[in-house]
Amino acid sequence: MDIKIGLLVKNRITLQDVVLHSKKLNKKSKSQLEEMVVVDKQGIKGLSKERRKKLEAYQHLFYLLQTNPTYLAKLIFQMPQNKSTKFMDTVIFTLYNYASNQREEYLLLKLFKTALKEEINSKVDQIQDIVTGNPTVIKMVVSFNRGARGQNTLRQLLAPVVKDIMDDKSLIINTSPVDVYKAWVNQLEMQTGEASKLPYDVTTEQALTHTEVVNKLESSIQSLRAVTDKVLTSIFSSLNLMP
């Protein structure tokens, strides 16, 4: 039933669909649904004084949660990892009405920004933690953009530049000194047909003592910067197309 009501918010089904689904509900759920239908037909005037007061209290609560994202940002990180996705789908996105208009879209993005700051302050000790960890905020953004609107926008913005990058067979990016060193040693052995006298297992510091490795790393970094610039240019030049 919660899913059916949630779909109402997404404008995917009509209230009649929910009514049809109510035939499978118990008496208490049917009673609640009938009240929804009455309120839908009569508006706020159909509410009793007590219910209207309760509605106003909820309005104040939701307004506070929407406009001050600190509360939800902190709450998100108190949720168990296995429940965070469901919490975001059933609570967060519903509260922001699935960013159906500019105001709610802005407020949801503001929540993402606040939550990301909160996560960095509480969980990130080193730069690599951002890559090796499993950021909750990233899961939120991915979940939000899985909708048709988000997918279409990302496809329009990034598909051409990503295809160019993938089709560039000459593009080699490897920023690991040890991996670059091992690839270089393998290349030497293939060229000479003899086993290299250089040690195969080395530390990062040892790998960086070889000029060839340093040169290859610098080339990879330049290629990475060029690719990154392409992606950023594609994004920044199309900001007006973003939902």
Image (cartoon, grey):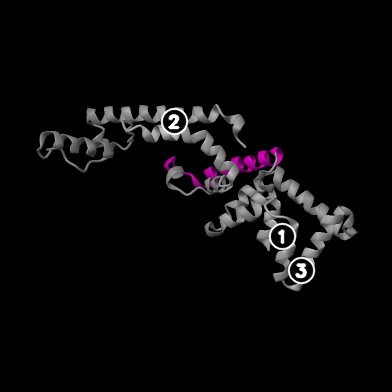
Residue 80 disc label? none
Is residue 39 found left or right of 201 in the rendered image? right
Is residue 123 found left or right of 225 in the rendered image? right
What's under tag 3, amino acid-wise? Lys
Magenta residues (range) = 102-128
What's under tag 1, amino acid-wise? Asp
Residue placed under numbered mark 1 in the picture: 17
Q: Where on the picture, by quarter, is residue 33?
A: bottom right
Q: Is residue 148 above or below residue 90?
A: above
**Residue at horizontal 78 percent and vertical 49 percent from the top:** 60
**Residue at horizontal 70 percent and vertical 65 percent from the top:** 21
How crowded is the residue under tag 1: few (<14 C-alpha within 10 Å), some, or many (20+)?
A: few
Residue 228 disc label? 2
Helix, strand or loop at disc 3?
Answer: helix
What's under tag 2, amino acid-wise? Thr
The numbered mark, 3 or 2, whose residue comes first in the sequence reads 3
Residue placed under numbered mark 3 in the picture: 30
The numbered mark, 3 or 1, whose residue comes first in the sequence reads 1
CB under 8 Å between discs 3 and 2: no
